[in-house]
Amino acid sequence: MSGAPDAIVVGAGPNGLVAANLLADAGWQVLVLEAEDEPGGAVRSDRGVHPDFVSDMFSAFYPLAVASPALAGLQLERWGLAWSHAPAVLANPLPDGRCAVLYRDAERTAANLETFAPGDGDAYLRLLDRWDRLDPDLLHTLLGPFPPVRPAAGLLRRLPRRAACGCCGP
């Protein structure tokens, strides 16, 4: 880099790297500063537990990354990014040996949740249906420019007048 940078990004985690890339794509000279030896922030893995297994060191569950307009705009697939989706995306093991698991397959998740209490599986499917109906406005509210006035208004129009959280009935 010649001369002073137009922007200095502190931190080479996912947000810092996306910001730096967007600025660089806009023609800015960007300097990224990172205190750690490797970039990635809390998104890092290693084989420290056992050489045959890759373990997440910090944070690894970023379900909205694939839907992010900022990441999509970087066209990272051109550079080899391939999204990987595990069949079981989240698990919560309990002290009694049982484990609540969220799968990419809704019916499989519902069957697992039903083992905890009768009706939990159906409640999950009802909640998932509600989230699916909110999806377009919800994603634009979460991932769009701030303040998200239009998408939030659309989201509010889709919510029922009561039980907006989906946990207390239709």
Image: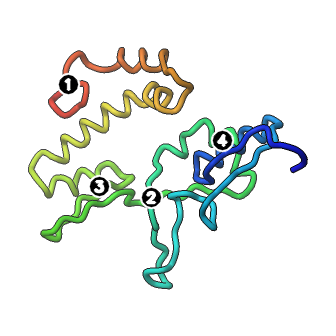
Q: Whole-percent x and y of residue 148? A: 49, 21
Mark 3 lies on residue: 108
- The residue shown at (43%, 81%) is 49
Q: Tell me the tag on residue 163.
A: 1
Residue 38 vs 119, above or below: the answer is: below
Residue 147 locus on image (x, y percent): 50, 20
Q: CA distance from mark 3 to mark 1?
A: 26 Å
The Cα–Cα distance between marks 3 and 4, rounded to whole angstroms, is 38 Å
> For residue 20, what is the image quadrant?
top right
Considering only order in the chain, which callout, 1 or 3, is on the residue closer to the N terminus?
Answer: 3
| x then y, percent, for residue 70 | 62, 38
Mark 2 residue crowding within 10 angstroms, few (<14) / some (14–19) / many (20+): few
Residue 19's mark? 4
Q: In the rendering, at what x and y percent does residue 39 appear?
A: 63, 60
Label 4 sits on a secondary structure element that is helix
Q: Left or right: 78 with respect to 64? A: right
Determine whether the residue tagged by mark 1 lies in a helix, strand or loop: loop
Residue type beneath disc 2: Ser
Given the image, on which type of amino acid does mark 4 rest?
Ala
* Left or right of 17, for residue 132: left
C-alpha span from label 1 to label 4: 37 Å
Q: Which residue is mark 2?
A: 59
Which one is closest to the eye, mark 1 or mark 2? 2
Q: Residue at x 63, y 43 (%)?
A: 71
Real-space Cα separation, disc 2 to disc 4, in angstroms = 19 Å
Badge 3 vs badge 2, beta-carbon distance below 8 Å: no
